[in-house]
Image (tube, coloured by chain):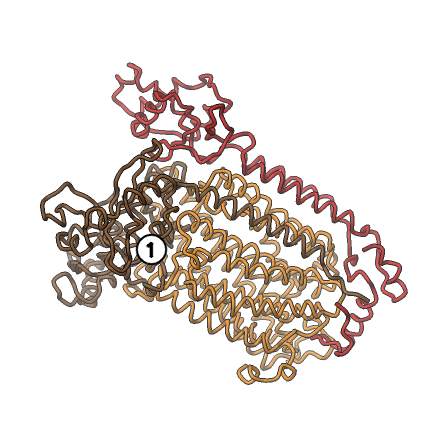
Amino acid sequence: MLKYLFAKNEDIPAGSSALFFGFSAIVWFVIGTGLGSFNAAKLAFPDFVTGNEFFAFGHMRQVHVMAVIFGWISLAFAMAMMYITPALGNTKLWSEKLGLWNCMLWNVGLTLALTLLWAGVSSGREYSDFPWPIDLYIAFCIFIPLGVNVWMTVINRRTQGIYTTNWFFAAATFLVIIVFLVGNAPEFFHLTGLTEAYLTWWFAHNVLGLWITPVAAAIAYYTIPKITGNPLYSHRIGHLHFWSIVVFYSTPAAHHLMSAPLPEWLKSFASVEGVLILVPAIAFVSNILLTMQGKWHMFVENLETRFTITGILMAIPLNMQGGFQQTRAINWYVHATGWMVAHAHLALLGFSTFLEVAAVYFGMQTILKRKLYSLALGNIHFWLLLIGFTTYWVSMTIAGLIQGAGKIYEVPYIDVVIVEHPYMIARWLGGTMVFTGNVLWLYNMWMTAREGTVIPEGRMAHELAYER
Amino acid sequence: MAFREYKIGARMFAVCLGGSMIITLLFPSITVAKSTSSDVALDKSFYAGHESGFSLEDPFLLGWNKPLKVTLKVDPKTQQPMEQKTVYVYQPGTSFPASIIHPRIFGKGIEELSLQQGRVGEAKRESGAVFGFAKGAFEGQEYSYVENLTATKGWAPADVMRVAKDEDVLHAGAGKTMFVREGCWWCHTMLPEETQDWQVFGAPPMLGDFNAESPTAFGSDRKGPDLLHVGSRNSSREWMMLHFFNPRLVQPHSIMPRFDYLWGEKDANGQKIDFDKWRAEYIEYRDGKRVNPPEVPAYGKDSEIRYLIDWIMSLK
Amino acid sequence: MAMKFDRPLYSLSSKAENDNAKALWEAESLGGMTEDNNRTPVPVVLLVILTVITAFLMTFPLWGQRPTAAIYAEYVKSMNSPEIMAMTDDTAAMAKIVQMNLGKQQPSKWNYDGLRERHPVTMDDMRMIKRQIEALMAKGVDLEDYTVVGNKVVFANFEGNFRADGTRERKQPWWDKGYTIDIFYLTAFFLGVTIVVKCLPSYKWQPKHNHDHSYESDHHL
């Protein structure tokens, strides 16, 4: 990588930045899920590595969250953008050099940011925990260069129209910058009180709704038609999806604070909008599933399709939960319980991660022009992720419902802790399976780069047999 | 051949996003800005100071640049006993709460009273100030307002600290910083639910309870009890000390981490704390080889755990 | 923006793929917009309509909101009755109060029985809020303007209708500001969607990928 940072843009092979982004993403995924597994172990066995500031749960919990969101998920997005945007514009990436610098600044900045966070240097605002100088770094050294590269590639495209995926990429790279700058205004301008609380959740809601959800969906709009060979079922439904994301997903931030003393009208408004998040979800899921018509055998046979469609199927329970759990009628029961933790993992580890994993698998094989080293390891990765995640989700959902019951029946809190103990162990086991799967994935990808079967010009990886 | 330029789409995008931001950011901020600080908010914002999370004045969240909450029993000027009064001591150089810098955060009424009668506008950061609360009426409505006691009574921070005994001083502001730094809020919410939940954890907060507080750190993922009113449920410092050192000493089923590292190097008597010995003895106790657990060392008066317990005690 | 001819076609794809794509895309004038425009399936439209209806039905009732002080006014009166005063067992006394007030006609449009069932209280809770409710009743204010939050009776966060004397009702009005904004917001969105969909070429229209056709299809834009 270093030798390309100062090379002429023309001398950098196409796909280099996607490659570095891809490997960085996988490494951060290993780190992030490793931390998650370690944290879960501490919840199950509180005396496991104890009495040390740097291994205290309160110091590590947010490092796990941020490593996964801004390391794994966002880097995988950047990887996908670096190869999908030019491919759909029938052009080359605007600047591979900018992409490589972006990747380098991202890794360095994130390492620094997470080290500080680990040491407790935090703004105390959930999901926007980073102190404001780091927020500015993320906006100006991470998201703006990424956005510039994506936008310039779209502008310099050699197709007339812009394909659905690229609408989403262009919009989301713009929106994430706005969300970062506006959502962290309480830190930049020292806004206080309920404004701070509300903007904290405005940020948290929108970084998920206007960055993670649309980009993950955009990836599926590329991978499914590309791998199955079926054209996207309908651009019209794609439009409905895109515009309802912008219109509905950007509004219900207040539904995260249904029990806070915000104005009641704001909660009423946010609650209706919260249910309407189902509109983009319906549009997206139906569009992708209809695209699969006639190619459902690939769900079984092809690793990338299997990952993507599993992720899409998980979007159904995800959005049913997301739409309804925020209404006043339900929220008071599940709010601040393990149910929410399960829901957050369904969104990030279920839905979005499965789509990104597929895009990284597919993209890496395309860029390296090498077929995956071991399908067996790929399959093990899939099942470890799926079974690990399901174990996690089921156990945390049950734990959350118990917590909710404890809340209304006025059970002393310690009894809830005692009852939850087996679910905490299950949660740790599930998380550890995901971590193990990712270690295998890193090995598999590394070996693919070194020893994978070379893909001849004009062929796709999944069309070839394994030859080694 | 021309490219499609997406002019209509780009404009529609701006309209949609702008509309969304007007409704979700501008409208609520108008409503929230109209709120008037409650007594809870005044207390919280004055003991916590300017900022409890990261700030340039306290970049490593060590409790720097924080005020002290002092219960005065002796008049700092005359040294005569007086009726007990809670004051907030801002030593020279300590940043003031956001509501002193921008008094409109207090809300109408309190703002006028604090500026006219409380003379908060005269407070200077370089020389420090002592704040207290008083009652007054504005347009027929009664409010608690903030009084700059340095201006109205001539009580300088140094005077107050000279007459205050250590047990009357609460490092609650530094304690809240410990709460943020140690990530307590990842498991303990500060927001009882509006429905049945409050019967165990106490009244949920109200509009105006947060003015000038930053960060509010509600928390969203409860793995332990809500802490908003924990000081009313349990006001034993002794219990808190044991519980923080090793929660399993007082609650065998607790999953809370140990916070023994907040004791620092030395205990209250200046003796070096031998953590390894303590842990070894605790394991013996846990395994049934000892009848009594080892003694928890008393914390020093400038230890981080003292700050944290001071803050917990002020959560009424 | 114009096509750049000064650079070769760059992409990650092979030459054959590029030539294919070039022939496909560069010859037609709608930029792929009309490509694969299958009809939006009726179930999808129905699901969207169902979502909008559910969104309002699901969120409109006062479920999960803080109880208004008015629902406990009758309880407070019952507490002062000699019958209840004589009882020593709190649980039995509370059960008796609930039973005494069951089905009593209320002056409001809300069904207090349902609200009381959703917000059960104990005698201890009642003792904490009794004084405050009595003070409000003595002042003669509308108790529906107040909510019970823990052990406090406070002004509700709602901004309702204006009264004759210029003050505001503090109860959820039928036109709750949040829902009103929602109605306008949704209407604008779905109106926009309908207009856009009607402007698009019919889903039956298929683009033809040849150079001659581009001129002819321009009017669809």
Chain that the image shows in red: C
Vertical placement of A240 versus A439: above or below? Answer: above
Residue underneath mark 1: B50
Q: Let me know if residue B243 appears in the view.
A: no
Q: What residue do we see at 61% from left, 49% from top?
A: A247
Judging depth in this view, the residue of C73 and A65 nearest the camera is C73
Residue at image x 83%, y 51%?
C204
Tally of numbered tags: 1
Whether A402 is drawn above or below C141: the answer is below
Counting from the top left corner in percent of width and height, residue A27 is at: 50, 72
Q: Position of residue B234 (x, y in %)?
A: 24, 44
Question: In the depicted view, which residue is nearer to us: C168 or B191?
Answer: C168
Chain drawn orange, letter? A
Give the colour chain B carries in the figure: brown
Q: Position of residue C27 (x, y in %)?
A: 83, 67
Residue C22: where, in percent of width, then height? 80, 71
Give the position of the N terminus of chain A as an image quadrant: bottom right
User: Image check: A140 left or right of A160?
Assistant: left
Q: Which is more toward the observer, A206 or A347? A: A206
Whether C87 is drawn above or below A359: the answer is above
Which chain is disc 1 placed on? B
Q: Residue furthest top?
A: C82
- Res B2 → quadrant: bottom right
Residue farthest to the left?
A: B80
Q: Quadrant of the C terminus of chain A?
A: bottom right
Q: Residues within 10 Å of mark 1 (few under 14, many from 20)?
A: many
- Element at badge 1? loop
Residue A98 appears in the rendering: yes
Which residue type carries mark 1? His
**What's the residue at 34%, 22% (across, down)?**
C76
Is A333 displayed left or right of C78 in the figure? right
